[in-house]
Amino acid sequence: MMDRLEWKHAVAAVAAGAAAAQAYRLARAYWNASSGPSRSRVLGVIPARYASSRFPGKPLVPIAGVPMIVRTYEQAKQAKTLTRLVVATDDARIKAACEAAGAEVVMTDSAIPNGTERCEKAMAALGETFDVVVNVQGDEPLIEPEIIDACVRALQASPDAVYSTPVTPFANKSEVTSASRVKCVADARGYAMYFSRGMIPGNKHGVPDPRHEYLLHLGLQVYDAAFLKVYSRLPATPCQLQEDLEQLKVLEHGYKMKTVKVAHAAHGVDEPADVASIEAILARQDARA
């Protein structure tokens, strides 16, 4: 049984979640009244933080001679649904590299804990009204602009969802058990049910089933802008903390998330060894061109 302090904390968490949910409903009503329900104005943000416990300086690592963050920007700017695209960073070196490539850069505080909140701060700094915010992970240098467009359109077509994100079948089943590859399961209508660093769905044998289509979560997140403004006010949730996956906070608070299944041959750069695989894919693309 809970003691009094545990009960007090539980009640506070529920109250905080309810307050954030009410704030979202009010913000959504304002957005609908001011810009209509079409979610037409779309801001693309590429968060890029220099410090990283696993891979310091990752945004500037060269991919076939070009900084990874620049390659990501070059891919994202081809998306047709984006009204505006910016890089949000806390580091002058990243800012310089991006501006040299022609990118618009918004400086954000290094204390911001995650990419989602960095996107919120970037949107606020721009001082404009947007209906949708796209978080393009800076470590996805091969993200296809068509995938960005598909996820934006999926959210625009799903008024009951506050978030959309792409998933793709694992090409290599041996990666299904890797903790650095985030997996997703979705329901029959394409709404996300869960994300995990472990193998999901599990089975009684504890090893990947070669007959099952496991889904890899790609580094792209598309938010309803009104929801993004209250996301940081939602209290952390148990599964979010266990998995260290911020998208689980959205699901655990009862919001709907639309997944878009796409064909995507490359995963992002999670660790230094991934750079070589990305460069190999680029070399094959160049050979076919």
Image: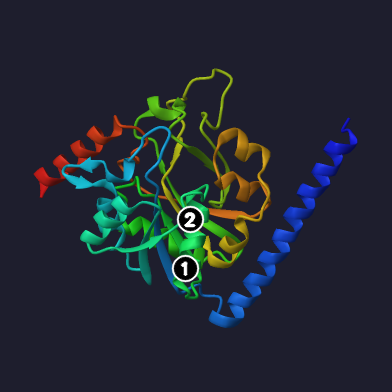
Give percent across and percent down for residue 222. Answer: 48, 58
Q: Residue at x 52, y 47 (%)?
A: 113
Give percent across and percent down for residue 213. Answer: 45, 35
- Residue at the extreme bottom: 34
Specify few, some or many for label 2: CA neighbours under 10 Å numbering under 14, 14-19, or 20 or more.
many
Q: Quadrant of the rendered structure where residue 104 is?
A: bottom left
Specify few, some or many for label 1: CA neighbours under 10 Å numbering under 14, 14-19, or 20 or more.
few
As drawn, the label of residue 118 is 2
Instruction: Give the residue at mark 1.
Output: 125
Query: How far apart, in angstroms, are the residues tagged by discs 2 and 1?
Result: 10 Å
Q: Residue at x 56, y 75 (%)?
A: 37
Q: Residue at x 23, y 64 (%)?
A: 102
* Total number of numbered discs in the rendering: 2
Give percent across and percent down for residue 270. Answer: 37, 36
Q: Are marks 2 and 1 in contact (CB under 8 Å)?
A: no
Residue 187: in sight, yes or no? no
Instruction: Identify residue type, mark 2.
Output: Arg
Give SS at disc 1: helix
* 12 left or right of 196 in image: right
Give percent across and percent down for residue 111. Answer: 51, 49
- Residue at the extreme front: 92
Q: Residue at x 61, y 81 (%)?
A: 33
As drawn, the label of residue 43 is none
Give SS at disc 2: helix
Instruction: Identify residue type, mark 1.
Output: Ala
Q: Nearer the viewer, residue 31 or 261?
A: 31
Of label 2 and label 1, which has the lower sequence position?
Answer: 2
- Residue at the extreme top: 205
